[in-house]
Amino acid sequence: MLNFPTAKLVRYAIGLAVAIIVLIMVWPFYTVPTGYRGVVTSFGRISHVENEGLVILPPWQKLSVFSIRAEQADIEDAEGSTSDTQPVKVSLTVRYSIATDRVAEVYEKYSHDGDLSSYVQTATQEIFKAVTAKYSAPDLIAERAKVSSDINMALRTKLSLYGASVINIDMRTFAFSPSYMSAINEKVTQEQLRLGAENKLKTVEAEQKQKVAIAEAEANALRAQADGEAYATLKAATAQAEALTVQNAALAQNKEVLELRRIEVEQTKANKWNGALPTAIYAGAPIPFLNVGKE
């Protein structure tokens, strides 16, 4: 048998253990961290939602910490099909958070901790299929920004049913089948070659036009020069002809002018003569001034 002091210690130890257990069971102090809400339940039924900070609860109530922080859902290779039946895949990252005024609803219906990644993945795949079906493959490539906007808007509407607010969507990859991408690359290559040929042709045409313009300008300059020279020659000939016409007309009207000119010439010769006769006179040669004294 235990002696009295030992039995007393045992009873004290048992009592302390029971007290600790009871204290733990009825401990009224709880803490809700920043970025969370505390969902308080009474016998499994939601009583109310506590904000961040210290919470004091009676023993019959339970506190569950619920995240309202930004959460992330990664969707890999979501499949869709365009309106012209081209398969397409996309990988997305969706960031979302639970609306603070719908914490109790989400806790009751969808998640006890605020993680809706499975719902987000399912909704995103559904939305992606619906949006891509509205576009042909070329339009899906050309209007990628609009496609992303359509997915964003539709997903916001869809996730609001689950009490989630979309923060942003990152479209990480966007790809068609390898055969279609190869065909697109070939088409782009051919288009670039065509544009290059057109640009080269335009350059050649521009150079040819420039050469033609230069040749035409030079021809016009030569033509203008020739026309100017011909016109000057014509004017000079016309002036000379007119002068001769005037002179002939004057001489025809006054024949005494010719005689006067002849006398002036003879007078000039006489002034220059030294009085010596030529030593040799050929037949028919004129003998100067033999008629000087003649009347």
Image (cartoon, rainbow, N blue to C red):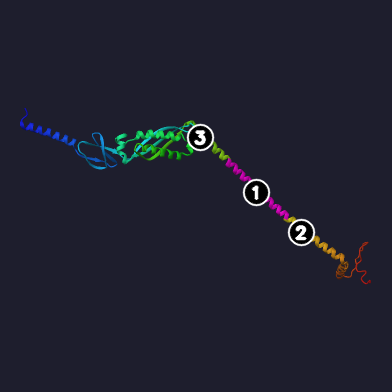
Give the CA distance from mark 2 to mark 3. Answer: 74 Å
Residue under pointer 3: 184
Q: How many marks?
A: 3
Q: Earlier in the sequence, mark 1 or mark 3?
A: 3
What type is the residue that disc 2 sits on? Lys
Q: Is residue 67 left or right of residue 192?
A: left
Callout 1: SS: helix
Residue 146 seen in render: yes
Residue under pointer 1: 213
Residue under pointer 2: 235
Q: Report the residue at 65% width, 49% height from top.
A: 214
Callout 3: SS: helix
What type is the residue that disc 3 sits on? Ile
Residue range in magenta is 198-227
What type is the residue that disc 1 sits on? Ala
Residue closer to the observer: 175 or 159: 159
Res 278 → quadrant:
bottom right
Residue 111 seen in render: no
Q: Position of residue 80 (x, y in %)?
A: 44, 32
Q: Which image quadrant: the N terminus? A: top left
